[in-house]
Structure formats: structure tokens, C-alpha cells
Amino acid sequence: MGRLLSPLLRGKTYTRLLHLWVPMLVVSVWMFIDPRRPWVPALALIPVGLVPAVRRGEGVQAQLLLTPDEQEPGFSVVASATWRDRLRTVLWLEARMALGAVTMFGCVWLPIATVELVRSARGGVGSGIPGLPQVGAHWWSALLAPLPVLVLGVLVVALGELTTAVARRLLGPSAAERLAALEARTEQLLERNRIARELHDSIGHALTVAVVQAGAARAAGDPVFTDRALGAIEETGRAALEDLERVLGVLREAERPSGSRPTLAEAGRLLQSARASGAEIDAEVTGPLENVPGPVSREGYRILQESLTNVLRHAGAVPVRVRVGVHDDVLSLEVRNRLLSGRVPGPGRGSGLRGIRERAALLGGRASTGPDAGDWQVHAELPLN
């Protein structure tokens, strides 16, 4: 019994009932004006449904009254963009009015029927309401009195479910709207992934340099070297704070320009930081880096940063060969270091190496990481157009 009565205890059952009653207010007013033509309000809904903004209003109403407890009810809350959407809105308005008429009829006549049956059971005579069957005085009418009330409860619940199903069908997002929502969601996920890579590369590089410098200073026991190491840690920390502020700025300001991120023009800072950590950097830059497009230059900077971070983290202070070149509409980056025995990271291991390949792929390029002729190599090629 509790399961049968539970729909009548839910708030949305009655918000759906209210949703069906709203168009009946217009019909009730019209019936005072011209009761001989009750179809006029339904006819007037056709031009109303063709107004683009009506679809937005109906979608908002459906969310608030039909599915008040759902986070993503699946109704469109934008104006009609195509004639197909407008026609679907017209059909919804007509269906809503028809279902509302059935609801109003049941809510008015079924309670009256219960009252008539109770009156009959008590030996009374019919009320004489036009259109209502007259029931004589019968004791067994008391047994039938609860039936109209039960029918009313079932009718209210069933019409609410039916109205919600019809609304999902006619007020649901169109194919174009679903595609736009999917693209927006994809862009959001890509942006979150990019921010995660930015934090990983920038902060990871700074922490790696700081750890290497601190360990080297403690092992050296030389005040001069310790002072130089502390200076390198301070400089790297400042740069990391600047990068962190850039990334957090993207989170705080959706319209913040991406041009504030570091580019390959600042690659000297990375190389100097790696040299200060003890690595022997043999760097060579060829080609006009100033002509490299902003997105390519920014991603190239991050690839170089992550490559140098991996060298310091896994190999330590070893000779490193860095080549950055611009030729044939391609930006190429190569970072090689001596491969230490027993310390091979393995292709594809770690989010840093995966991030390098993802950055290259997003720009239509390619990147490879792994052992090569006794060295550990990171090689990336990014198209410039």
C-alpha cells in the first residue's frame, strides 16, 4: 500500500499538476467570453509557439515544475533556432493544453461523483447537476464512494508522467543543440587537461630543480656552491610562481588571453636553470623563433621544460644535448642525454611523457620518447601552419 501511495506523497506530483493547470486559466477566462467556441485558445497557441523566446520559457517551466528534483532534466532552455524547433514548440503547447483539459475535467468531476455517491448512501437525492448521472438512494453507494478518489489519484500521477515524457520529447534539445553542448563539454575537458599539464610541467620543473640543487649543496659542503645553489632555487621558485599565477589566472578569468604564457623566446631561462642544477647543456637554436606562431611556441616551451625536468629527475647532472630548429614550416625539438644503466623510464610511463605526446598531437604534430643509440631521447615536430 505504501508503494502505491508513495507517488501521491511526492512534491513533484503536485508541481506537475500545477503545470497542467496553468494553460487552463486562459481557457477559463475565454469561456466567460465565448463558451460556444472553446477551440479558440488552442488555435491562438499556434502563432504563440512560433515565437522563438517561447521555447525558452516553456523549457524553464518544465525544469521547475515537471522535474524539480533532477540536476539535468534534459529540457532545452534556449530560444528556437530553426523552424523545426518552432513546430515542436507549437505541438508541445497544444499537447499541454489537451492534457490540461483532461486533468481539469478529472479534478472537477471525480470529486463531485464521490460527493454524489456519499449523498446516495445517506438516502439523499441527486444534486441535479447537468450532465451528471442521477443516483438514487442506495446503501451500496458507500462502497463505490472511494472509487472516484482513487481514480483521481491515479489520473493525476499518470498525467504527470505522461506530460513529462511528452515534454522531454518536444522540448528536449535538438540535434544541433546536443552537438553544441557536446562541443562545449569537450572544450571544457580539454581546457582542464591543459591546465593540469601546465601545473605539472611548471611546478614539477621548479620542484625538481630545487630538490637537485638542495641535494647537491648538501653533498658539496662548499659555502660558495651552496650560495649559488640557493640563488638558483630562488630564481626557479620565482619563475614557478609566475607560471602558477598565469595558470590560476586562466581559472579565475575565462577571457584571459593565452598570450601571457611563456614561449620559446624564454627558453634561455630554462637552459640556465638546468645549468645551475649541474647539467651540462649543449644547446643550439636555428631558424627564426620569432616567426613561430604563439600556440606552437607556447607548447614547444612546455615540451622543452618537461624534457629538461625528466633529465634532472631521472639522470641528474649529466651532459644534455638540446636542439631547437625552425625549418620547412616545422618546429623541431630534440633533447638527448646519456642513458644511465638500470634507470630506463620506459616509453609511455609517467604523465609527463604522455603530456609531451598529447601537446604535439593537439597541434597536429608528433613526438617520440625513449631510448635511442644509448641515449634517452625526446623528439618532437610541430607544424607551423
Image: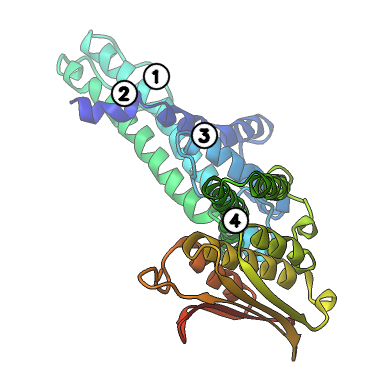
View extreme (front): residue: 222
Q: Residue at x 30, y 20 (%)?
A: 114
Between 291 and 2, the residue placed more toward the observer is 291
Q: Is residue 57 above or below residue 333?
A: above
* Image spot of residue 306 (x, y percent): 58, 64
- Give the residue number, with chain letter if any, for mark 3: 65
Report which quarter residue 360 is drawn in. bottom right
The residue tagged with tag 2: helix, strand or loop?
A: loop
Q: Which colour scheme is used?
A: rainbow
* Image spot of residue 314 (x, y percent): 47, 63
- Give the residue number, with chain letter if any, for mark 4: 205
- Give the residue number, with chain letter if any, for mark 1: 128
Between 7 and 198, the residue placed more toward the observer is 198
For the residue marked with disc 2, what is the amino acid? Gln
Q: Which residue is drawn at 38% across and 73% down?
A: 341
Asked whether disc 4 touches disc 2, contact meaning CB atoms under 8 Å apart, the reply is no
Asked whether disc 4 touches disc 3, contact meaning CB atoms under 8 Å apart, the reply is no
User: What whole-number distance in Å separates the C-alpha atoms at marks 1 and 4?
Assistant: 90 Å
Disc on the earlier residue, 4 or 3:
3
Q: In this view, does 130 lie above or below 103?
A: above
Disc on the earlier residue, 3 or 2:
3
The residue tagged with tag 4: helix, strand or loop?
A: helix
For the residue marked with disc 3, what is the amino acid? Leu
Q: Is residue 69 above or below residue 370?
A: above
User: What whole-number distance in Å separates the C-alpha atoms at marks 1 and 3?
Assistant: 37 Å
Between 258 and 325, the residue placed more toward the observer is 325
For the residue marked with disc 1, what is the amino acid? Gly
- Give the residue number, with chain letter if any, for mark 2: 134
Q: Report the mark closest to the observer, 1 or 3.
A: 3
Give neighbour class at mark 1: few <14, some 14-19, many 20+ (Cα, 10 Å). few
